Image: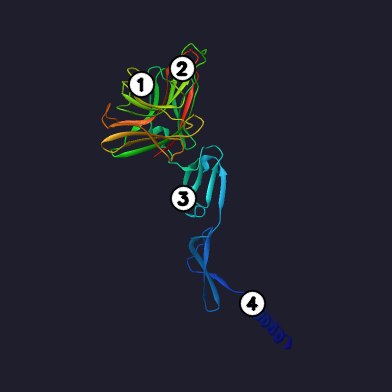
Amino acid sequence: MKTIILSVFLFSFSLANAQTPVVRLKTGTTPTNANCMSWGVVGSIFTAGDSGTPCGGTSITSGPFSSLPASCFHSATASDMYLPSDSYYTFICTATNTFSPFSDGKQMVLPTAASTWTLVSGTGGVATKADSSGAVKISTTTPALAVEALLKSIPAAPYTKTIAIRYVNGLGSGAIGTGSDIARCGVLVSNGTTNSSAIQIFGPWLIYPPAATQQQNNVAVLHYANFQFSTGVADAQITASMGLVGNTTSWFRIADDNANRTFSVSPDGVNFLTVFSEARTSPFTPTHYGVFCGDQNTISSTNVGWELTLLSDN
């Protein structure tokens, strides 16, 4: 009998001195990974629940573009980053469950899928379009002497379209002195989606060999009766030494304020230089906008291909 009493006493003493708190989850609580917990005390019992707010921290992950997370680990704290191994962009969490693309330190607006763009080529054109890890590209290995473009319906005025592109355009292999091979890449507006539609193109000259009056970084606005570079008229041309070359991102802006259509260019997406402005219905009323490349003339029959990547369409 004494042994039993002693055992109970020792057991009670052990409980009294253990000082182990009792923690219970609040009724109906299901903790969320990465969320902080809220605490309370009911009598001598601690209660814990999900605060509904992510705890601080940083999450930087990487992988293919196709594995871009659908949600941000730390919500809108801008501390989450995803680095695709096969894309032009870095993705940063800028809002609740929203990863936004950045390139060259600038926030981009991903273009819609290639299937939403209309591919139009001049006679003989064989360009193709494709999705490219968030971007959209148009390319060819056998360029035609014509404009080849991706088009989409133009917004209702007033509008401002800001477009970022990169491109590689290989010129012909003719000998210096036998003529000039002129290629162009940039943005355009058109009055339709067939190769007989009138177009107005905006972009730098790519010329081989360069002449004194035709430098590679000249930026021009020109309009044509169709995609074949026929009956062309130069609307404006400036020498813009701003590093507008294919291996850097070039920014173009077309704006319509319900009175005039204005063309501007920028090497950094921040500072834009106005190249040309005209009445919004001159030389025609556009129905579509887009991006293009094309060879205007050739000095050899061995032209090599080109590729243009549409990085941002805002």
Nearer-N-terminus badge (3/2): 3
> Residue flagged by tag 1: what amino acid is it?
Phe
Mark 4, residue position: 19
How far, Cα to Cα, is label 3 from label 2?
45 Å
Q: Report which residue position mark 2 lands on.
A: 181
Measure how far apart labels 2 and 1 are at the Cα level.
Answer: 18 Å
Please report contact status of discs 4 and 1: CB closer than 8 Å, yes or no: no
- Closer to us: 41 or 209: 209
4 vs 1, front mark: 1
Looking at the image, tell me whether mark 4 or mark 3 is earlier in sequence order.
4
Q: Classify 293 as above or below 271.
A: above
Residue 94: which disc? 3
> What's the amino acid at mark 4?
Gln
In the image, taking residue 13 as reference, residue 183 lies left or right, namely left
Residue drawn at 53 percent across, 63 percent down: 36
Residue type pointed to by label 2: Asp
Gap between marks 2 and 4 measured at Cα: 87 Å
Q: Which residue is mark 1?
A: 227
Q: Nearer the viewer, residue 108 or 193?
A: 108
In space, the residues marked 3 and 1 are separated at their CA atoms by 41 Å
Instruction: Select label 3 or label 2 by which is in front.
Output: 2
As helix, strand or loop, the secondary structure at mark 1 comes to loop
